[in-house]
Image (tube, rainbow, N blue to C red):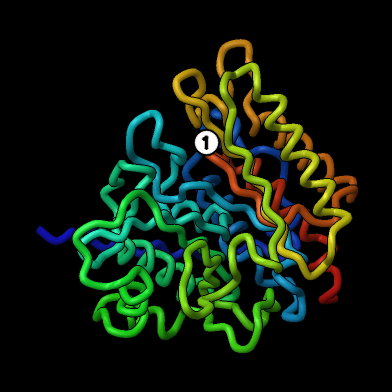
Amino acid sequence: MPFTRIGLRTLLVTSVTASLTAALLIPPATAEARGAPVESGAAGAAEASTADWMAGLPDGASLASLSVPGTHDTGAWTGTVWSRTQDMELSRQLESGVRALDVRTRHYRDAFPIHHGAEYLHLNFTDVVTDTAVFLSEHPTETVLMRLKKEHTEEENTRTYEETLDHYIESDPETAPLLAEHLWRPSGGERVPDLGEVRGKIVILQDFDAGKGYGIRWGGASTDIQDDYRVPTLFDIPDKWEKARSHFERTADGAPETLYINHLSGSGAPWANPREVATGGPGFRGVNDHARPYLSRSAAEGTLPRTGVVMADFPDQELIGAVIGHNRTVAAQRS
């Protein structure tokens, strides 16, 4: 049986009333982020302030110069305790300010079901393309970085992974029209584009082998990545955070044309699952708990010029906002 598409989610139309400055000067943790009760209107305003945060950044700013919140294993808002890495589904992640996605595609029966390891997440590439395209249509000033990674085993295919991706881009009646409008197609050698070139577009971070380039190569000459995900026990969380913190310092001092990518995520079966590593447990602070005050302080004090792309498990609005807040310097270049 072929995989069935999950139905299109209801389009969320937000009235963005916050100014650009308000969007970038993200306030301290909202009541929702702290786990306190929150009025529905306040939650809507918080989403509106982050849905268009790229709007006031200059077109000439390289994506490498930005501070970009992202989600590790973006599609894993369902699944077992060892597979689940997110609480928000994709459309909510995007409205909350996330602009970097980690899309794990298994090549199965000439299609791309979304997996975390061996576990199918009841989501397919068509759903990811549709939800991302809907968001970009409603928010054309934004761009979305999308890591595409081969996941698990390839089985029962009549074509290569590259040929199946080309089918989605060129022929599939559901995705081809959307990607024709919203997929950035690089020309010339590998490079990190400027924001003005890719507004309203998906920029692929290519984590698979192919005969041609589809975007920016993951692990290529234009990227510098920290992704040491091994956290054997909760006692190893401080060591994981130290690796992430060191990479933030490396990003601050690094080549301006390089896209730095820093993973806060980690796991260590059977003693530390992704949620415990991210959010902690009794007597333990999670990696997000270390990152949140560090990034909030460095955004307020201007001590970290950019964070690069920050990939996280279970990010809350405060953590997302702390990353976005580092774009003040870039925004000032527009005035």
Residue at the (76%, 65%) spot, across then down: 258
Residue 312 location (% of width, % of height)? 58, 43
Residue 300 location (% of width, % of height)? 84, 46
Q: Left or right: 180 with respect to 268? A: left
267 is higher (above) or lower (below) than 332: above
172 is higher (above) or lower (below) than 301: below
**Quadrant placement of the N terminus:** bottom left
The answer, for residue 10, to whether it is visible in the render is no
Q: Residue furthest left?
A: 1
- The image quadrant that residue 142 belongs to is bottom right
Residue at the (74%, 73%) spot, across then down: 62
Q: Left or right: 202 with respect to 298? A: left
As rendered, which of 319 and 138 lies closer to the eye? 319
Q: Residue furthest bottom?
A: 188
Task: Estimate how packed mark 1 is, as few (under 14), some (14 to 19) or many (20 or more) residues with alpha carbons within 10 Å.
Answer: few
15 is higher (above) or lower (below) than 300: below
Q: Name the kind of residue labelled 1 in the image.
A: Val
As rendered, which of 209 and 44 lies closer to the eye? 209
**Quadrant placement of the C terminus:** bottom right
Residue 224 location (% of width, % of height)? 71, 57
Residue 136 location (% of width, % of height)? 48, 72
- The image quadrant that residue 54 belongs to is bottom right
The secondary element bearing badge 1 is classed as loop
Q: Which residue is mark 1?
A: 38
As rendered, which of 20 and 100 lies closer to the eye? 100
Q: Left or right: 259 with respect to 298? A: left
